[in-house]
Amino acid sequence: MIVFILRRLTQSAVVIAAMAVLVFTGIFAIGNPIDVLISPEADEVERAAAIARLGLDQPMHVQFARFVESAVGGDLGTSFVHGVPALGLVLQRFPATLELALAAMLLAVLLGIPLGLWAGLKPDSVAGRVIMTGSILGFSLPTFWVGMMLIMAFAVQLGWLPAGGRGQTASLFGIQWSFLTRDGLAHLILPAINLATFKLSLVIRLARAGTREVALQDYVKFARAKGLSPARVVGVHILKNIMIPVVTVLGLELGSVIAFSVVTESVFAWPGMGKLLIESILQLDRPVVVAYLLLTVLLFVVINLVVDLIYSMLDPRIRLGGGRA
Amino acid sequence: MSAAREESPLRRLARDFARSRVAVVGLAVLVLVMLAAVFAQLVAPQDPYDLAQLDIMDSLQPPGTAGGAGWTYWLGTDDQGRDLWSAIVFGLRTSLEVGILATLIALAVGVAVGMLAAYAGGAVDGAIMRLVDIQLSFPAILIALILLALLGKGVDKVIVALAAVQWAYYARTVRGSALVERRKEYVEAARCLALPHSRIMLRHLLPNCLPPLIVVATVQVAHAIALEATLSFLGVGVPVTEPSLGMLIASGYGFMLSGNYWVSLFPGVALLVVIVAINLVGDRLRDVLNPRLSH
């Protein structure tokens, strides 16, 4: 177990280091932010001062050494556009993204498992077919387009829900959350549905496949023969056993939901870190892009590690690192 | 059963495929869309990027308006008076071009790498597959965003980014089937004949690994098109001079909120039709080409 954890940690460290080099060299070697950031009317002295202030006059390896040194200390540079520390800027937007991602996951699970169970228990019924067709659509439709259609239907045509923004927020643990106020909740609904669509389809498929497999097992037949109520058989015997794949996949998908929130946040003007990333890419605000990417990679590595560990504990059939050295 | 004559594999495949009516419809739509994209100049009443043909007086006309040039804007016009149908046909061309090229490049790279891993085995295999695992643990959109943040805008850059996102799927698929095929007798026979490794890989192993690759590639074209549309929507994909469907949808976004729904809606429908058609064909191919599922 310890060997496994150590090996996974080393691997994770290598991934983060490789990412840092890739992101840094790419971003700092291509594109010239000086032209974008310094007004064309600025005279030579102002230009030189700005370049020196941003550290852009140093040779590439010096810039990188500086970058690594300060990155380890949690300082990823100062945003060219906002003039505040890049990491702080990204972290400040993180709660909004997290809130959106968790709301989407919750929706996907709460709707997906019952729908998948239903489709799995009655695969040939009309409802079962409708659910499966819906899930194919959910896989096929591009997220940004679904989001636009949601805005069009519920915000523009019907006028039921707001089209964008986070609405009124309330403070909890010193962080602003939307779901604590009525207005914020109304703003959260459409983006959460949008972000959930893809994962909902995934959960439906997983739950359906699991149900079809489990429903044929002997212990389910036995439970039925014992005279247990159908509700108990489905709710206890089947549900418990389809949860293992669902939980694992969802753990891994949390990261992907955070990555995909880039799209939803852009459509709904949700002030999370995904929207910040797109704005920063377009404005060539390199420190912010670097901070976002490194933070997300770190998040991913941690999530993958944790899911791997939990999975090996949940399912004793998985022997850690067994066989292959 | 009555005809005892040997049927060619391709023919059997076509017959099996045609058993699903939905898949045939999907294929028909796909062929039509491809033809429209290839012959865009003939299908579209105007060249949407020849500014001389645009009439700014015709901007934001609703669908079905009669245009000044004597033909009707069946799908309406955008803010520059561009016929939306023409813009969609030309946009389809960019979208398909990007999707197909990216898939082909990724396929070539992935197959080469996956074959190598399966054939070489040992440390080479371990290193390659570790890389594949790591890459697949990151969502495609994140990798594409990183690459495009590094490379900048452009059709060629989007193709590179999409290929970089996809190659790992093919590598994994081809390695899986090559590992199975490698142990079969015909490969052993080829080895005994002392054929060169490259020949065994290309002429013996590869053809037998094709079915799952075809299925994955079909579905990946749809993914590539959707991802390209998403990236272009976010403004980091193709440039304004070569708009894809995603770009058209993005530029219509602002008008949607003011009630001019068609500028964004129709390119979206076109995108949807393409993706669903490809997925239908891909799903059917998966059923037909997978011997474990056929009864």
Image: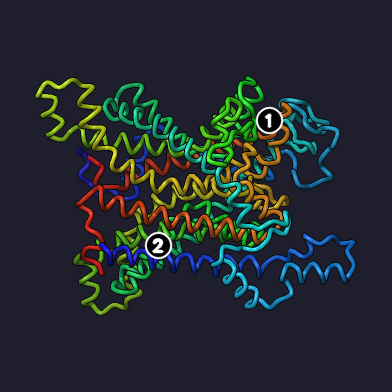
- Residue B239 image offset from top left, x and y in percent: 69, 53
- Residue A233 image offset from top left, x and y in percent: 20, 26
Element at badge 2? helix
Q: Residues within 10 Å of mark 2 (few under 14, many from 20)?
A: some
| Mark sitting on residue B262 | 1
> What chain does badge 2 belong to?
B
Residue type (three-letter) at the residue carrying disc 1:
Trp
Element at badge 1? helix
- Residue at 80% over, 39% down: B80
| Mark sitting on residue B132 | 2
Which quarter of the picture shows residue B157? Answer: bottom right
- Residue A296 image offset from top left, x and y in percent: 52, 55
Q: Is residue B108 left or right of residue A24?
A: left
Mark 1 and mark 2 in contact (Cβ < 8 Å)? no
Q: Is residue B176 left or right of residue A184?
A: left
> What chain does badge 1 belong to?
B
Nearest to N terminus: mark 2 or mark 1: 2
B279, above or below B130, in the image: above
B142, above or below A204, in the image: below
- Residue B11 image offset from top left, x and y in percent: 34, 46
* Quadrant where the image shows the C terminus of chain A: bottom left
Asked if residue B28 shows in the view, the reply is no
Q: Is residue B140 left or right of residue B8?
A: right
Which quarter of the picture shows residue A77? Answer: bottom right
Q: Residues within 10 Å of mark 1 (few under 14, many from 20)?
A: many
